[in-house]
Amino acid sequence: MNFIVFDLEWNTATPGKNQVAGYRRKLFAEITEIGACRLDQRGNHLDELFLTVKPKIFKHLNPYIANVTRQNMTELKELGEPFPEAIRQFMAWISGPAVFCSWSDSDFKPLQENLEFYEIVAPLPNRCIDVQYLFHRLVDQGHRQRSLVHAVDFFSIAKERSFHNAVDDAYYTGRVLEKLLEVAETKDINLETLLHKFSWNPNLEYSHKESLPFERSPKAIPAKLSGQAVICPACRRELIPKGQIGWKKKKKHYVATAICPEHGQVTGRVSYGRLNGVVPELHFSYWLKKYDQ
Ligand SMILES: [Zn+2]
């Protein structure tokens, strides 16, 4: 088993340009770079991959993104691979069992969105590590979302490469992961425990929302919620709320928790009001707990 640390850069519609409405509805972020590093189980850097993707949807770089990533549209158009070919090369390069790792979980949505847009079936590994979360849990508990630069500075990792390029960010994320594996060892956390406690599954839905018309007075909500199930976002099982009271009032909301036998703890929250329609509604939100503790 190796770690595949990856990073993506992507482009979005530029306000006033790229008015390809049909595409925009289907694709919010078009991937333009795929960068990845392969690490062994101790976090040693083995090799790396860098692919640029030829843009198909958005023909202009969003100025904000261009400013951060320093990407060049002419180069992407001339040198980039079409996305299906780039993802084929990426998957072929991974070869063998791997744990995906990334800095934050924000690259997964664009990845899944681009795969769906091109109708490519490429199942993602069930166990992925969010290195930003691991950094928060193992060493810096003060702030949930530190920047990659912060973690690089924290471990005094030499800044010998640039930032905000997919393969360079993947490289630095890999170096931070290497340090975190050393920290885990000092805390007697072995690899299996680390994966059990700190990995998540990008193939699962972690949240789910639905609404019900509710034209009665808010005072009638507790009666309505009595016996109301909590829905698991991942499998849509109807779960019985924990405790004798079930749905409890908490400020302006009602909350309940339940346990899905397959996916673990789910929290439900209900609010009352008009969100879109004229008829008052009960808005149900459900969250699956992402990590084991
Ligand atoms: Zn479930």
Image (tube, helix red, strand yellow):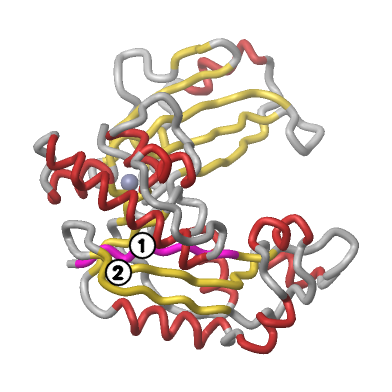
Helix, strand or loop status at disc 1: strand
**Relative vertical location of residue 92 with respect to residue 72 in this rendering, above or below:** below
Look at 27% across and 80% down and name the residue there: 95
Helix, strand or loop status at disc 2: strand
Q: Name the residue under label 2.
A: 38
Please state which amino acid type lies under the numbered disc 2: Arg
Q: Where the C terminus falls, by quadrant? A: top left
Image location of residue 269, percent across then percent down = 50, 27
In the image, which disc is placed on residue 5? 1
| Residue 289 appearing in the image | no
Main secondary structure along the magenta-highlighted residues: strand
Left or right of residue 61, residue 204 in this image: left
Image location of residue 260, percent across then percent down = 29, 40
**Relative vertical location of residue 228 with respect to residue 134 in this rendering, above or below:** above
Image location of residue 280, percent across then percent down = 73, 28
Please state which amino acid type lies under the numbered disc 1: Val
Q: Determine the CA span between mark 1 and mark 2.
A: 6 Å
Frontmost residue, 61 versus 67: 67
**Relative vertical location of residue 5 with respect to residue 229 in this rendering, above or below:** below
Image location of residue 139, percent across then percent down = 30, 32
Q: How crowded is mark 1: few (under 14 residues within 10 Å), some or many (20 or more)?
A: many
Look at 13% across and 50% down and name the residue there: 192
Look at 14% across and 44% down and name the residue there: 193
The image shows a total of numbered marks equal to 2
Magenta segment boundaries in residue numbering: 2-9
In the image, which disc is placed on residue 107? none
Frontmost residue, 278 versus 11: 11
Query: Are discs 1 and 2 less than 8 Å apart at CB?
Result: yes
